[in-house]
Each structure stands twice: as structure tokens, then as C-alpha cells.
Image: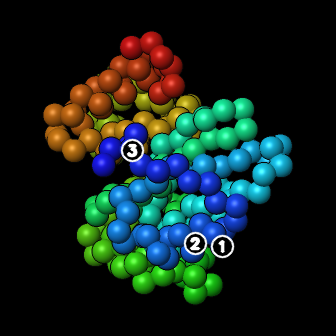
């Protein structure tokens, strides 16, 4: 099944979304959850509710897109083994666990992430720790380090996520070189110029 063939389903409430997940979380590859904008007057699960319920069953949100002036959709699917966890989703899981809302499937995904190291994979990124190889590249071009540290926390985090997400050493080295060059030119990650 491809992304374009996944069903688009609206849910009028958090309870309806949770009921769907209880039945389908282990046998469906994903779905496009359709949100109705508040101004439409159509009851709809909210983004925060949808994400929390998805986490309870080991699912995660990703791509989003506008359908029309009153609706947009967001892709939800089972979390892949080894995928990193953001600080905010770890906090959500902790809160949902304390409220005894986590389903066995969600608890199993969390346990697997903790065992594999995926749970803590981005802790240094969230703490804005500059890895030694990026630090060296930034120091090699004097304005780069000063410019990089002057970027907003969100801009620095975006660069650090991008570098950390590289799967191969060559890809990582290329991303570090690009980040250092852009920082030397005082260009933030959202600057479209290459």
C-alpha cells in the first residue's frame, strides 16, 4: 500500500479515534486522519488529542497537507523500530503512562525504543549540544561558530537534527560541511539559497 492509497478518515472525537486505534493499530499500515478546522463547525479530534492517542498504541504522526479551506489531513502510522523520539513525545508518553492510558502495544514500542537506544537518540540535539565534528568544522571558519551560536535555538536544533539523522558517515560529513559553510555565510537552515 502506498501513501496515496491509504484511507482518509475523519474522527469527530478523541474517543472515536481511540476506538479505531484499538481495533486497527496492529493490522493497518496507516491512515490519513482528516481534521476539520474549528471554523467549519464540524466536530473533530484535535491534533494534540490525535497524537496522544496514537502514541498510546505505538503510532506516530508525520506528513500533513491541506485538503480544502475547511480541512487538512495528517498521516498516522505505526512507529518504525529504531526511529528517534522527540522530547515532547517522551513527555507525552510519561504523562499518558501516569494516567494509565498507554495500551500494551504502545508500551511495547516504548520498551523497544528504550532497549535499542532510540528513546534517547536525540537527547543531545534537544539539549543543543554541538557534536565534536560539527564544532571542529565551525571553528575552521571563524565567523561560522559565532554565527551558528547566534542562531535561534530552533534554528540550531534544526541543523543538529539534520546532522544526527544522517545514516552514513559520508552523508554526515557532507551535512556538516554544508552547515558550517552556511553558518559562515550567516545563513540559517530555512534560507532557501544553496
> Which residue: 78% across, 51% down?
42
Residue 135, position as x, y percentages in the image: 34, 37
> Which residue: 30% across, 74% down?
112
Screen quadrant of the C terminus: top left
Residue 13, position as x, y percentages in the image: 70, 65
Q: Is residue 129 above or below residue 50?
A: above
Q: Is residue 122 left or right of residue 93?
A: left
Can residue 55 be seen here? The reply is yes
Occupied quadrant, residue 53 = bottom right
Occupied quadrant, residue 5 = top left
Spatial CA span between label 1 and label 3:
25 Å
Q: Is residue 144 above or below residue 167?
A: above
- Residue nearer the viewer, 118 or 59: 59
Q: Secondary structure at mark 1?
A: helix
Q: Secondary structure at mark 3?
A: helix
> Which residue: 48% across, 43% down?
63
Residue holding disc 1:
15
Residue holding disc 2:
18
Residue 34, position as x, y percentages in the image: 60, 49
Answer with mark 1 or mark 3, whichever residue precedes in sequence: 3
Mark 1 touches mark 2? (CB < 8 Å): yes
Residue 57, position as x, y percentages in the image: 46, 73
Spatial CA span between label 1 and label 2:
5 Å
- Residue nearer the viewer, 61 or 142: 61
As drawn, the residue found furthest toward the top would be 193
Residue holding disc 3:
5
Mark 2 touches mark 3? (CB < 8 Å): no
Amino acid at each position: 500500500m502506498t501513501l496515496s492509497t491509504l484511507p482518509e478518515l475523519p474522527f469527530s472525537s478523541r474517543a472515536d479515534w481511540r476506538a479505531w486505534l484499538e481495533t486497527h493499530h496492529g493490522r493497518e499500515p496507516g491512515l490519513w486522519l482528516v481534521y476539520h478546522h474549528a471554523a467549519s463547525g464540524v466536530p473533530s479530534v484535535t491534533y494534540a488529542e490525535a497524537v496522544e492517542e496514537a502514541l498510546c498504541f505505538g503510532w506516530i504522526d508525520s506528513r500533513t497537507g491541506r485538503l480544502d479551506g475547511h480541512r487538512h489531513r495528517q498521516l498516522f502510522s505505526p512507529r518504525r523500530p529504531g526511529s528517534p523520539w522527540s522530547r515532547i513525545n517522551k513527555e507525552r508518553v510519561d504523562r499518558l503512562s501516569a494516567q494509565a492510558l498507554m495500551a500494551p502495544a504502545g508500551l511495547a514500542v516504548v520498551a523497544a525504543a528504550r532497549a535499542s537506544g532510540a528513546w534517547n537518540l536525540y537527547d543531545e540535539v534537544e539539549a543543543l549540544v554541538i557534536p565534536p565534528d560539527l564544532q571542529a568544522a565551525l571553528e575552521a571558519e571563524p565567523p561560522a561558530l559565532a554565527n551558528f551560536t547566534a542562531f535561534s535555538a530552533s534554528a540550531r536544533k534544526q541543523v543538529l537534527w539534520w546532522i544526527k539523522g544522517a545514516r552514513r558517515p559520508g552523508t554526515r560529513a557532507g551535512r556538516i560541511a554544508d552547515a558550517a559553510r552556511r553558518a559562515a555565510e550567516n545563513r540559517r537552515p530555512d534560507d532557501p539559497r544553496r
